[in-house]
Amino acid sequence: MTLFKSPTPGVVIYGTSILSMIDGMGAFKNNALKILEENGIKNIKPNNLYSQQKFLNSLKIIYEKLGDVTIKVIGMKIPEKVQLPSNIETIDQILNSIDRIYNMNHRGGDCGSYEFKKTSNNEGFMIVDTPYPCAFDMGLIEAFMNKFREDGSLTFINHHSEECRMNGSSSCTYKVKW
Ligand SMILES: [Zn+2]
């Protein structure tokens, strides 16, 4: 999927995710609000829907200005507020549900996918094909795993594929371990 480009015209995203992005900007919240407004997103309410393309345009500007670390922090904020399907208790279950959660938070057509392939008890691959930047998705997946981590255990995510969406590939593959 092409970076920063909504794959289907008319895809919309719930305000909750946009509000998480603003949270992730920390001391730069006002900058985030200004960038969003300049890109046509304002008066953000959790349950209202906004153009995914306008959100991606705003994220692109933030990425160009502030880089991977900020984009990763924004990704890590998403799991805090997002509504989860019921009955998720383990890291396995959350990794298998990210695709569904992503599609619950976007409306209006194909917007990409998260495919989890378990390779052993506590390891697997996550293949991500979305228009969001690589660091955003790495932060998002890590934070979802940490949400269901048992006390005293650790989680890991590494970029496994040489191909990366940041270099024009259509997907990134991450190795996850817990
Ligand atoms: Zn990547």
Image (cartoon, helix red, strand yellow):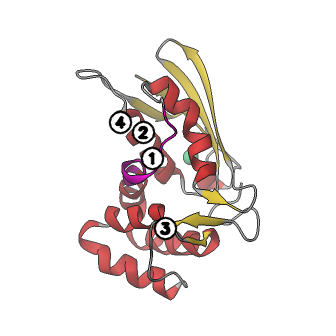
Q: Which amino acid type corresponds to the residue marked 4 in the rendered image?
A: Lys
Circle 1 — which element? Answer: helix
In the image, which is nearer the foreground, mark 3 or mark 4? 3
Residue to which mark 2 is pinned: 144
Q: Identify the residue position indicated by label 3 in the image.
A: 15
Structural crowding at the residue carrying mark 1, measured as other residues with C-alpha within 10 Å and reported as few (<14), some (14–19) or many (≥20): many
Q: Residue 173 placed where, x, y %?
A: 60, 36
Which callout, 3 or 1, points at the residue further toward the start of the chain?
3
Residue at image point 39% right, 58% down = 74
Picture quadrant where residue 110 is located: bottom right
Q: Which mark is residue 140?
A: 1
Mark 4, residue position = 147
Q: Residue at x 68, y 66 (%)?
A: 5
Residue 21, located in which quarter of the rendered image?
A: bottom left
Number of numbered discs on residues: 4
Are the residues flagged by discs 4 and 2 in contact, CB closer than 8 Å? yes
Circle 4 Cα neighbour tier, 10 Å, few/some/many (<14 / 14–19 / ≥20): some
Q: Is residue 12 above or below residue 142?
A: below
Q: Secondary structure at mark 3?
A: helix
Write the start and end of the magenta stretch as one range: 76-86
Q: Give the alpha-carbon distance from disc 3 to disc 2, as whole Å.
A: 19 Å
Which sits in the foreground, 96 or 1?
96
Q: Nearer the viewer, residue 86 or 115?
A: 86
The span from disc 1 to disc 4 (Cα, nearest Å) is 11 Å
